[in-house]
Amino acid sequence: MMNERLRMVQDLIDKGYIKSESVRRAMERVPRDEFVPEDEKHRAYLDIPLPIGEGQTISAPHMVAMIAELLDLEGGMKVLEVGTGCGYNAAVIAEIIGREGHLYTVERIHSLYERARRKLEALGYDNITVIHGDGSRGYPPEAPYSRIYVTAAAPYIPEPLREQLEVGGKLLIPVGSDKFYQELVLVERLSSGDYRSRNLGGVAFVPLIGKHGWKFH
């Protein structure tokens, strides 16, 4: 499926989603077909979200590329991902920050946590730690983080995530109460108590469930 992967990446470049060499390389290296269920493999390199079980989805490739570009990642960074899902997004980010960096990713659904942990381990990503827990609380043991991103929509920006961001760090999160439409918000920590936020446009993500997210389920 390598040719399909390369065609997908070229299409994302042509459409302006992939702008940097680091994101291009990462998305060429990570096999999306390894992260989707067997009956979805034939659609692995279409630019669409796909079901991964438990009512969750793997994001469309253009959204993964957008997240990677907006985070402005560098080698060696410590990154927190909230919402591991199948692990694909984590693998792309891990490729960019390199072996000298580390990504911590939190998944609340145990079956997805186990599946992602096993898959990432099998693919050799020793710079990723998968944690089973409530990602809306962040992951305090390894804070602060250079970058934090959330792959589910929150009703508001969780305070623990802001607090776990280092000064100069960036947090990317979808925020909104509508099931089918949210705003993608980029938060930058300017000092210990000063933050700057900007809206980057409309997106649609599954809801973030947890203490600092939605309370249902």
Image (tube, helix red, strand yellow):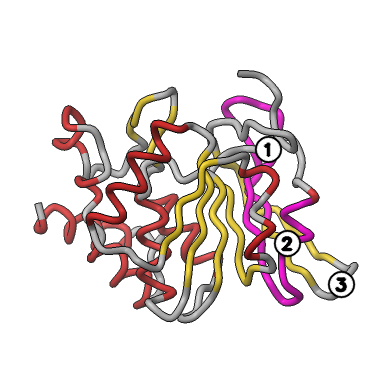
Dot 3: few (<14), some (14–19), or many (≥20) neighbours within 10 Å?
few
N-terminal of the pair, mark 3 or mark 1, is 1
Quickly name the residue at label 2.
164
Q: In this view, does 56 lie above or below 86?
A: above
Quickly name the residue at label 3.
192
Tell which tag, 3 or 1, sits nearer the viewer. 3
Left or right of 170? Residue 34 is left
**Residue at coordinates 37% horizontally, 43% vertically from top-left?**
60
**Residue at coordinates 72% horizontally, 54% vertically from top-left?**
161
Give the CA distance from mark 3 to mark 2: 11 Å
As helix, strand or loop, the secondary structure at mark 3 comes to loop
Quarter containing the C terminus: top right
In reply to whether residue 164 is colored magenta, the answer given is yes
Q: Which amino acid does label 2 sit on?
A: Gln
Give the CA distance from mark 2 to mark 1: 17 Å
- Write the start and end of the magenta stretch as one range: 160-185
| Closer to us: 31 or 79 | 79
Give the CA distance from mark 3 to mark 1: 23 Å
Residue furthest to the front: 141
In reply to whether residue 162 is colored magenta, the answer given is yes
Q: What residue type is labelled 3?
A: Ser
N-terminal of the pair, mark 2 or mark 1, is 1
**Residue at coordinates 63% horizontally, 65% vertically from top-left?**
142
As helix, strand or loop, the secondary structure at mark 1 comes to loop
Residue 183, image x, y percentages:
66, 43
Query: Quarter-wise, where is residue 141 in the image?
Result: bottom right
Quickly name the residue at label 1.
154
Residue 64, image x, y percentages:
42, 53
